[in-house]
Image (tube, grey):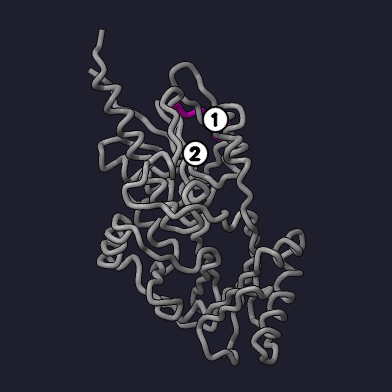
Amino acid sequence: MNRPVSVGIVGGGMAGLTCAVQLAQRGIASTIFDKGRGPGGRMATRRIAAGNREISFDHGAQYFTARDPAFIAVCRTWQAEGVIAPWPAAGSEAWIGVPGMNAPLRHMAGGLDVRWGTRADSVSREGALWQVRTGDTAHYFDRLVAAVPAEQAAVLLADAAPEIARRAAAVRSDPCWAVMALFDQPIDIAADVVRDDGAPIPWAARNGAKPGREGAESWVIQGSPKYSSEVLERTPRDICPMMLAQLFDQVGVAPVEPVHCAAHRWRYARVPAVAEPETGQDLGDIAIWNGEIALGAAGDWLAGPRVESAFLSGRALAELIAQDVSSRFMEPQE
């Protein structure tokens, strides 16, 4: 009797969790390792205690859209389950997680074996198996998936899969500084979303006004790739007053001192644009699978700079793995 196939997945973001969910639907179990303390990645939500309530900030992806039929179907299910909601202030097609942007990821992770707070220090081929080392512990799998940003995949796979590592190393993601500011009274900005393409601060949003939030005067302010690159190595203590001053200057209102302010540096915030995935597109165009060494890669760096792209990449890789597993079980046994 053949034993169950085991799959190790490094990365618990949209691509990794989607791959795991799709594999589970095909009867293939996986174990996911993620260095983060919980679901999020670039769809992260940070929470702080403010007085007698908790305030959240979606300091990564601000919203997502759905165009592919498969992702549209998933979004409809998430909406029915109360995991996401439309956000008209950001556009007619904008969706957000409820009560935080990481809600869809938390929902997907609920039925999976995810090891949060566990960094994959190295991966290596040990005979017919893949070894994933986390600290002093070694984990073994029949097949391995790297579902991390390109820059991290390049390092992780440098020795184990140099061709894939070189492809990942060629990707250069834009950075982004994000500021999370809480005010004790409404500031003089009427709109809940401020867009100013080409400016140092191209995006700012009243986070507390999003559906399912607490209604606080909380703002997320994001710097442009150019601006963020210029101040990339500054400290969060420096960034907070700089970006707040820049925002107030851009919108033409008097500066207001926040009661709380924090900054987060996303070194790999947004991957370069690639051709939009099309329905019926070859799976290998948006995911990587090497059946000879039983290793694959998925992520937005292969499919485009959108949450949906990461979903489609993870879904494609799961299908490629399932095809590989099926073909090997169908091979004649000696």
- Residue tagged 2: 146
Q: Kindly identify the residue that appears in the image at 35 percent across and 62 percent down.
A: 67
1 and 2 marks in contact (CB < 8 Å):
yes
Which residues lie in the magenta part?
A: 134-140
Which mark sits nearer the N-terminus, 1 or 2? 1
Local crowd size for mark 1, using a 10 Å CA cut-off: few (<14), some (14–19), many (≥20): many
Q: Find residue 123 and name its label.
A: 1
Asked which quadrant contains residue 25, the reply is top left
SS at mark 1?
A: strand
Q: Main secondary structure of the magenta part?
A: strand
**Is residue 133 left or right of 68 when viewed as pictured?**
right
The residues bearing labels 1 and 2 have C-alpha atoms spaced at a distance of: 10 Å
Question: Is 255 above or below relative to 178?
Answer: below
Q: What's the amino acid at mark 1?
A: Val
Q: Is residue 135 magenta?
A: yes
**Type of the residue with mark 2:** Ala
- Disc sitting over residue 69 in the figure: none
Look at the picture and state if 224 lies above or below 256: above
Query: Does 10 lie within the magenta span?
Result: no
Q: Is residue 91 above or below residue 41?
A: below
Residue drawn at the location 66% of the way across and 91% of the way down: 253
